[in-house]
Amino acid sequence: MKKTLLLAFATTLAVLPLRAVEMCWVFGNNMILQADRPVPIWGQGKPGEEVVVEFAGQQKKTKVGEDGEWKVTLDPMPMNATGQPFTVTAASGNKSFTDVLLGDVWLASGQSNMAQPGAEKSEGGDALASQPPNPLFRVYPIAYNEWAPEPNTKQFAWDKKVSNWFEWIPARPGTSGVPYWFGSMLQKETGRPIGVILSPVGASNAECWISMKDLEADAYFKDVVENSKNRIANAPAEQEKFQAEVDAWKKRKADAAAEGKPFTERQPHNLRDELAVRWWVGALYNARIAPLRDLAIKGVIWYQGENNAGKRGVNAYTTESYDRLMKNIIASWRKQFEQPDLPFHTVQLSMFSWNDGNGRTPRDPNKPGGWTIIREAQEKTANETPNSEMVVSWDIGEKADIHPKNKRPVGERLAKVALRDTYGKKDVIADSPSYASHKVEGEKIRVSFKNTHGGLKTKGDKVLGFAIAGADDKFVWAEAAIDGKDEVLVWSPQVSQPTNVRFGYIQFQDSDLYNSADFPLVPFRTDSLSIADKKGAEPANPES
């Protein structure tokens, strides 16, 4: 019988030779360690053997425990942009790293829009590639097993290391746009070395990024957890079944060729099962977050939600469920990294509508769609979670492309949030204008906004993006005009007695309203109608 994916993974761990001073793959040459706070350093070795860690004038000693684990914690160290040596020694061997800096380490995660390159539409098309190299801005792209059935806190042997820290040269092919622009701005504005640990996976659900144990503690997600457990248990049989189908197809193809007959049958393709590993609770957390253990980091940036908006797999796709799930994820990561106030900044989903982009479905303000539901949840999570901010990105969305190419505004908006909230630069404007109040004035609704920072503006010749409804709760597209610095009047000849107003509450919508700092308006609604029913959501375009 052929080995299954799960069996092969378990066997690999079982036969892994135990050597001295094994360490997590994130430690290496050119790495950046977190300044100004205690820095845990850990690994594996031979039980009872002494391990000595030396860096920046500090020397820490410990002995490997009976479980083969060792750990020391370096005292807080100030920022240092000059590379230093870092050594870990034991009687049976050592690790020696060079050019190690002290600065700030950020973890970038989510799905493909956090990983996607972005230069084509950024200031003429060559903005990314034209950026000069910066030796104080470095990246570590996690390039290890995509998923794991259990938390992978026992590290692979050093000779299995397949990625390294390197200076983030913007012209390098495939440079991830959002984290690049985020880290680049931080480094320039703070003067500190900035390191980004890059860990997004395309087409991944949010559920994959939390430990099974942590999500299981919330009874609300009982069915989601059980479904994932069943997927994991059934994976070996599913893989064998699919392989048998492929083998049978290959035989039919070979037989046809031998007989000189045409063969047009397509090869079996288990897209569902290929993506299913990204849908299991804990699958990506186990492989890409758990190994980092309690690594000292500055904060997290997160860009995810497309898969949940499209209801792919066994996921949370209502406002309540996604909001609750994200709060669990944030709490779980803060617990793992032993930072109860760890900054966790997110990107609200951009405008996108596959059907609208192909002209198949007219835009209906009464059908919000899955993207809108997740956007609403993202705002709720940010508003109710301390030290968590959300940046708005609807204005860079592309109606027929799930991967907007202009990543620069998103990365720099995240950077401004971090500069203001994490680095204490209170003079930095980092918030979007948002709804404050509204009142009915005859056949119009006057909406007041906060965080306009001097006034509202459009980038075109008119205000776009509003819908209005009367007592029948039927929304229609509306006219709108800025009235004063902080207010907008909204109306429609189809609604003589308006009661409620919406902005940006649809999959894709032509919108145009900003504050003086070019931050786009946060989508909002004044009604309390349910937008989470299945009729309101359209299917997503699967990520490639």
Image (spheres, rainbow, N blue to C red):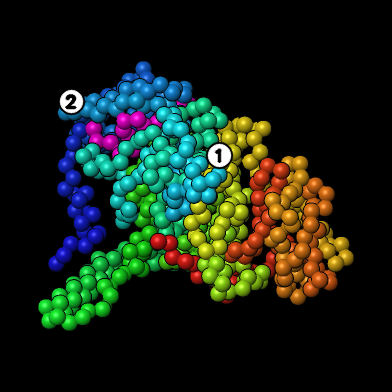
Which residue corresponds to the image point at 59% horizontal and 39% vertical from the top-left? 416
Q: Is residue 467 left or right of residue 8?
A: right
**Residue 405 falls left or right of residue 101:** right
**Which residue occupies the foreground of this view, 364 or 384?**
364
Whether 28 is among the magenta residues is yes
Question: Could you say where residue 290 lies in the image, as x and y percent from the top left?
Answer: 36, 46
Classify 186 as above or below 321. Answer: above
Mark 2: secondary structure? loop
Badge 1 element: helix
* Magenta-colored span: 21-38
Direction from residue 463 to residue 399 in the image, left or right: left
- Amino acid tagged 2: Ala
Residue 155 at x, y percent in the picture: 27, 42
Residue ID for mark 1:
415
Q: Which dot, 2 or 1, sits closer to the camera?
A: 1
Q: Residue at x 21, y 80 (%)?
A: 262
The disc placed on residue 91 is 2
Dot 1 alpha-carbon crowd within 10 angstroms: few under 14, some 14 to 19, many 20 or more:
many
Callout 2: 10 Å neighbours few (<14), some, many (20+)?
few
Closer to the N terminus: mark 2 or mark 1?
2
User: What is the quadrant of residue 295 in the picture?
Assistant: top left
